Amino acid sequence: MTKIGILGNGRVGGGLATALARAGHDVTVADRAPGAAAEAARSADVVVNATPGAGSLERLAALRDELRGKILVDVSNATVDGPDGLPADLLHHDSSLAEKLQRALPDTHVVKTLNTMLHSVMIVSGSLSQPAGVFLSGEDRAAKETVRGLLVDLGWREEWIVDLRGVETARATEAAVLFVPHVIRARGFRPFAVSVVT
């Protein structure tokens, strides 16, 4: 059992909280109450960033002390949304949200994952017509192994998990979010994920 704090209680955060608690973990979800995020981060071993990506850096940088020594699982994408509310561009052209979080939180182990799929696929990976891939980006090997274990608890099979290595590789997975509006317009709002077939 891992003590997990989830920042963000929307569809992503709520879905992950339910699935991780069902897998036997001790999960706390931070609501919007003052101090809730700090308390959730302080009491957890692993913290999940499920807040809207455009504001994540500022929110989490304010929790530097609470996140010291913790694993931060970043599942968000920092985008500029178009008039229809779908991602139209990346917020960080020369970097990624994960890299910026790692620089702002040097004593925290940032691991990027689960950001190349619709939220429903994060916890029901078997709902697609063929196996999907899920990627890991981060500097700390032990932190990535912990996150790998959580992914398995969510239903991801070991062979579907691809470690891309350093946190800089999050630039590639975060850019995959630009597929989202085009796929939705072409095929409707159906569960999908970006995957690698070899």
Image (spheres, rainbow, N blue to C red):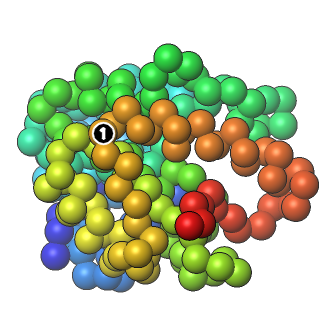
**Residue designated by label 1:** 166
Q: Position of residue 176 (x, y in %)?
A: 62, 43
In the rendered view, tell whether residue 126 sits above or below residue 14. Answer: below
Residue occupying the point 56% across, 67% down: 198
Q: Is residue 179 left or right of residue 35?
A: right
Q: Position of residue 141 (x, y in %)?
A: 17, 52
Looking at the rendering, in which quadrant would you find the N terminus? bottom left
* Left or right of 69 in this view: 159: right
Q: Which residue reaches farthest top?
A: 94
Q: Quadrant of residue 58?
A: top left
The residue at 35%/55% (across/down) is: 163
Residue type (three-letter) at the residue carrying disc 1: Gly
46 lies above or below 106: below
Q: Is residue 45 visible?
A: yes
Q: Residue furthest right?
A: 186
Residue at 57%, 52% (x, y): give it.
116
Q: Residue at x 43, y 56 (%)?
A: 135
The part of the image, by quadrant, that contains residue 33 is: top left
**Residue 69 located left or right of residue 163:** left
Q: Is residue 154 visible?
A: no
Residue 185, horizontal then vertical, whole percent: 89, 51
Q: Secondary structure at mark 1?
A: loop
